[in-house]
């Protein structure tokens, strides 16, 4: 049987993998004309396209066109021509399905002017086509500039939306009124559960121009590009019974001393995952952690650590340990970008004994001795329990900087031996970046180990 003779059901599954599996990456070379890129695709890094499938033969064309899931995830990248508009319209038509209600995921990224006049009319046509399908919107992601505001006005007349579950917005040079109107339209959906805000929204949060629009008490996932500790706590206090995941790319500015008593203490009953990408100099995690109790917390990510200032770093660790103890939670995944040797002693706390996934990204290679000391600590066995003394439940480990592959292998062997004849080590995967002249990654998959 040849590929052209496969049953439609099997062919459909192959097509779905072809379009939506993403092991590849499209590299955008800004030195090359953008017209060489496919501006309408499934994802920003797509190298596969369902239009290609429809061009092979009549049978493949019939199958591809009959599968709305191949077309219902659309990434529109810097639209600039009528050809882009027609391709976008084609995808919308084929994504609708037989009854015209198939859920739609849209990502639309507007072209940046870079000081030059840009063709916004074609972009406006794409927005108009997208709004015509508002009843199918499931997920919407937008990167917008100020000259796009008029194109969204028809959306305000058709709201409320009924099926939108998630939106992400990044604005640049939008006026506050336009920004509020668009966010109000998105937040009109009773199905809304996930929101991501860019920097422009944070500026409006400071003036309470947006905060009273967002249904914080219905959201399960929140993400911010920039946020201040005081606003973070206030938002959390409005979503304490629903929020499960929150991420902040940059936590900025210290909490004013004279207003600290105005910020409530908050118990987040369902929060499972908490990520703070970067804590800007002048702010520190204790301003947030001291106000929280997180009994359901399972994942905590601090990839750039607390701060380079020793005193604030110590305060951050103390605040974190107090949070874990106060919350009585069982933390399973932890990422901390701390290059100081004191991190080992903090990690030896019984509060981390339930960890199954540990990530230690190292910022400065000259402090890679932290990784070596951690490997030694992970190798220690507890004779009374016949298991490793540190992180006995650890399944995956990532170290970005080590000097010796042998030290990693010795640690793995030591943890296996620590169990004696009464069980197997739970460690299943180790990833380490080895630095000794030439860099390479050590990947150890231990699932098939005796």
Image (tube, rainbow, N blue to C red):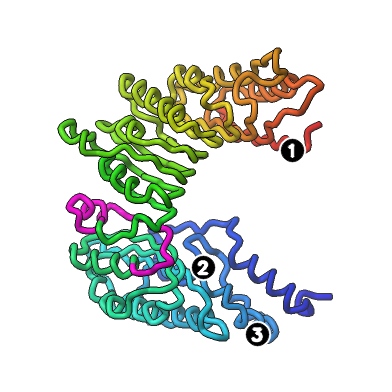
Q: Are marks 3 and 2 in contact (CB under 8 Å)?
A: no
Task: Give the secondary structure at mark 3.
Answer: helix
Say above or below: 380 vs 336. Answer: above
Say above or below: 74 vs 385. Answer: below
Q: Which residue is mark 2?
A: 42
In what quadrant of the picture does the N terminus appear? Answer: bottom right
* Residue 344 x %, y %: 50, 19
Give the residue at x 73% y 79%: 8
- Asked if one can make out residue 54 in the rendered structure from this viewpoint, the answer is no
Give the residue at x 60% y 75%: 52
Q: Where residue 202 is drawn, which disc sits there?
A: none
Q: Nearer the viewer, mark 3 or mark 1?
A: 1
Distance in Å between CA atoms under marks 3 and 1: 43 Å
Residue 193 is a magenta residue? yes
- Asked if one can make out residue 205 in the rendered structure from this viewpoint, the answer is yes
Task: Give the secondary structure at mark 2.
Answer: loop
* Residue 97 x %, y %: 56, 82
Give the side of residue 4 with respect to residue 168, left or right. right
Task: Give the secondary structure at mark 1.
Answer: loop
Q: Which numbered disc flags the more N-terminal residue, 1 or 2?
A: 2
Q: Which residue is mark 3?
A: 62
Tell me which segment is drawn in magenta: 188-211
Give the side of residue 373 with respect to residue 385, left or right. left
Q: Quadrant of residue 198?
A: bottom left
Q: Residue furthest top?
A: 383
Q: Which numbered disc flags the more N-terminal residue, 3 or 2?
A: 2
Residue 106 is a magenta residue? no
Q: Which residue is mark 1?
A: 447
Q: Which numbered disc flags the more N-terminal residue, 3 or 1?
A: 3
Q: Nearer the viewer, residue 190 or 345?
A: 190
């Amino acid at each position: 049987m040849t590929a052209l003779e496969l049953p439609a059901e099997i062919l459909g599954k192959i097509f779905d993998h072809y379009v939506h599996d993403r092991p590849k990456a499209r590299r955008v070379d800004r030195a090359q004309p953008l017209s060489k890129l496919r501006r309408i695709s499934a994802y920003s890094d797509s190298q596969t396209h369902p239009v290609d499938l429809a061009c092979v033969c009549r049978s493949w064309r019939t199958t591809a066109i009959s599968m709305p899931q191949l077309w219902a995830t659309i990434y529109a990248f810097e639209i600039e021509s009528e050809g882009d508009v027609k391709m976008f319209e084609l995808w919308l038509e084929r994504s609708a399905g037989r009854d015209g209600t198939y859920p739609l995921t849209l990502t639309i990224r507007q072209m940046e002017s870079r000081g030059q006049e840009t063709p916004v009319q074609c972009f406006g046509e794409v927005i108009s086509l997208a709004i015509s399908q508002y009843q199918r919107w499931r997920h919407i992601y937008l990167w917008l500039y100020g000259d796009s505001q008029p194109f969204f006005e028809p959306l305000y007349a058709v709201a409320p939306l009924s099926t939108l579950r998630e939106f992400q917005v990044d604005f640049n040079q939008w006026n506050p009124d336009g920004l509020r109107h668009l966010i109000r339209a998105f937040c009109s959906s009773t199905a809304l559960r996930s929101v991501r805000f860019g920097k422009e929204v944070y500026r409006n949060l400071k003036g309470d121009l947006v905060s009273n629009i967002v249904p914080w008490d219905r959201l399960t996932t929140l993400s911010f590009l920039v946020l201040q500790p005081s606003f973070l706590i206030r938002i959390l206090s409005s979503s304490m019974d629903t929020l499960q995941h929150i991420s902040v790319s940059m936590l900025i500015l210290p909490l004013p001393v004279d207003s600290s008593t105005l910020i409530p203490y908050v118990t987040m009953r369902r929060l499972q995952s908490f990520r703070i990408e970067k804590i800007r100099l002048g702010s520190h995690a204790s301003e947030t952690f001291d106000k929280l109790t997180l009994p359901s917390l399972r994942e905590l990510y601090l990839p750039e650590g607390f701060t380079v200032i020793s005193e604030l770093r110590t305060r951050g660790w103390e605040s974190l340990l107090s949070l874990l103890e106060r919350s009585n939670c069982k933390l399973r995944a932890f990422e901390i970008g701390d290059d100081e040797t004191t991190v080992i002693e903090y990690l030896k706390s019984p509060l981390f004994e339930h960890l199954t996934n540990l990530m230690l990204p190292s910022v400065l290679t000259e402090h890679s001795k932290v990784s070596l000391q951690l490997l030694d600590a992970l190798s220690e066995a507890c004779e009374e329990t016949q298991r490793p003394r540190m992180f006995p439940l650890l399944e995956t480990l990532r170290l970005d900087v080590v000097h010796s592959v042998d030290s990693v292998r010795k640690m793995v062997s030591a943890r296996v031996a620590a169990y004696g004849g009464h069980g197997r080590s739970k460690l299943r995967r180790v990833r380490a970046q080895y630095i000794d002249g030439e860099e390479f990654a050590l990947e150890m998959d231990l699932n098939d180990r005796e």
